[in-house]
Amino acid sequence: MIRFEPRPDADALWTAASFAMAIAAGLAISALLLASTGADVAQVFSALVRGAVGSPKALATTLVKAAPIILTGLATVIAFRAQLWSIGGEGQVFAGAMGGYLGAQLLAGMPPLLFFPGVLIVGMAAGMTLGWLAAMLRNRFAVNEIISTVMLNYLVIYILSWLLQGGPWGESGGTISYQQTPMLPTDDFLPALFGSARLHAGVLLPFVAAALCSIVMSRTPLGYEIRGLGYNPEALRHKGVNIARTISVILMASGALAALAGAIELFGVAHRLRADNLVGLGYTGIIVGMIGGLRPLGTVLAGLFFGGLASGAVYMRVLGDVPAALVPAIQGITLFFFLCAGVLARYRVVKVAVQ
């Protein structure tokens, strides 16, 4: 008979080996899946790498696709480390884009140094509001945050649908109404980096956010409270910490990060608000945060990996002639093995004698 026991000390070498085995196993199973479709596995993986990092254009696309999921991954890290199971990233991403679009209308004509920080702050405020609502429902009425954040996701998406379909933000052409806003003015686009048509200044924000999250988590009283809430909330309460306040701060910070992802997608990529171009970013962020071990650095690396998968998917489909559905399948396989690696890194298998 066997059982899992927590490892007393984290072994960096064993942790690295666990994740290396996860990568190898994920690649092996993905190769078998690809081979079952009749695809040339070597050609498919080569196309995937070329599409992800094979040229400056591909690398720019990878960074742009990774940016929002790194931010939603960091939002997951902050909440989940405190064992606050917020599933509201999806709605908060939409809220961030909606807030940013509203901010663009309110701040139209302002200088760029005021306009861009302003619209991003308004977008983040929308996500913070959703986080505050979830915290208030938990603190006052003991509503589980899983339920409240999922229901808030639906609420935000329905509000957006109303705004776009016959509402004040919908674009109309002749007698036709489209489920999208008019295109933003070109002056409202986030500035391009290095003269690239794809790479915008918003891709820098996830790395700044990750550095700040790492500092907050490891070197501030709030980080202590986040970790303490996750490990032992009763002990934290006896230390004199206001648990309700801490929950509110954590969920609001998580909401702000997820909303920032929506705002930079609006001003850096889509340049108009639509009902379909933000779908999945919040849920992907949960996967990225989990694969990253609920650590900021790990989340950045996992986000870059998933950004590379998304960027290389086009090359993989065209040059490798594989179904589009295989990309999320490979992501799911990767998640499974990385979660297994996380268990191996934190626990050891012990044989117990049967009495």
Image (cartoon, helix red, strand yellow):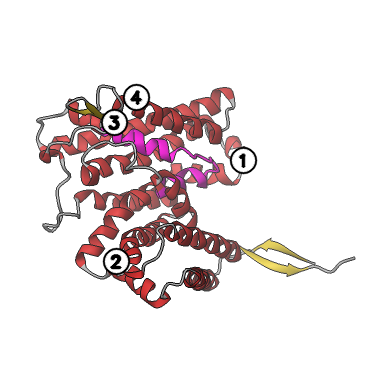
Left or right relative to 88: residue 138: right
Q: Decide which of 34, 268 is in the foreground and name it.
A: 34
What amino acid is found at the position of numbered circle 2 in the picture? Answer: Gly
What amino acid is found at the position of numbered circle 3 in the picture? Answer: Gly
Q: Badges 2 and 3: C-beta atoms under 8 Å apart?
A: no
What amino acid is found at the position of numbered circle 4 in the picture? Answer: Trp
Which residue is at a point 41% across and 56% down the rendered structure image? 299
Which quarter of the image is occupied by the N terminus?
Answer: bottom right
Q: Which mark is residue 212?
A: none
Asked if residue 340 is positioned above or below residue 134 in the image, the reply reads: below
Question: Picture quarter containing residue 46?
Answer: bottom left
Mark pair 2, 4: CA separation: 37 Å
Question: Where residue 227 sits in the image (x, y, percent)?
Answer: 52, 47
Which stretch appears magenta? 73-100
- Mark 3 neighbour class, 10 Å CA radius: few under 14, some 14 to 19, many 20 or more: many
Q: Which residue is mark 1?
A: 235
- Between label 4 and label 1, give the one nearer the viewer: 4
Q: Does label 2 or label 4 sit earlier along the sequence?
A: 2
Which quarter of the image is occupied by the C terminus?
Answer: bottom right
Q: Residue furthest bottom?
A: 42
Q: Does label 2 or label 1 sit earlier along the sequence?
A: 2
Q: Which residue is mark 3?
A: 99
- Mark 1 neighbour class, 10 Å CA radius: few under 14, some 14 to 19, many 20 or more: few
Mark pair 4, 1: CA separation: 46 Å
Q: Which residue is mark 2?
A: 51
Question: Where residue 29 sits in the image (x, y, percent)?
Answer: 52, 70
Q: Which residue is mark 4?
A: 162
What amino acid is found at the position of numbered circle 1 in the picture? Answer: Ala
Mark 4 lies on a secondary structure that is helix
Question: Where residue 74 sits in the image (x, y, percent)?
Answer: 40, 48
- Between label 2 and label 3, give the one nearer the viewer: 2
Q: Badges 2 and 1: C-beta atoms under 8 Å apart?
A: no
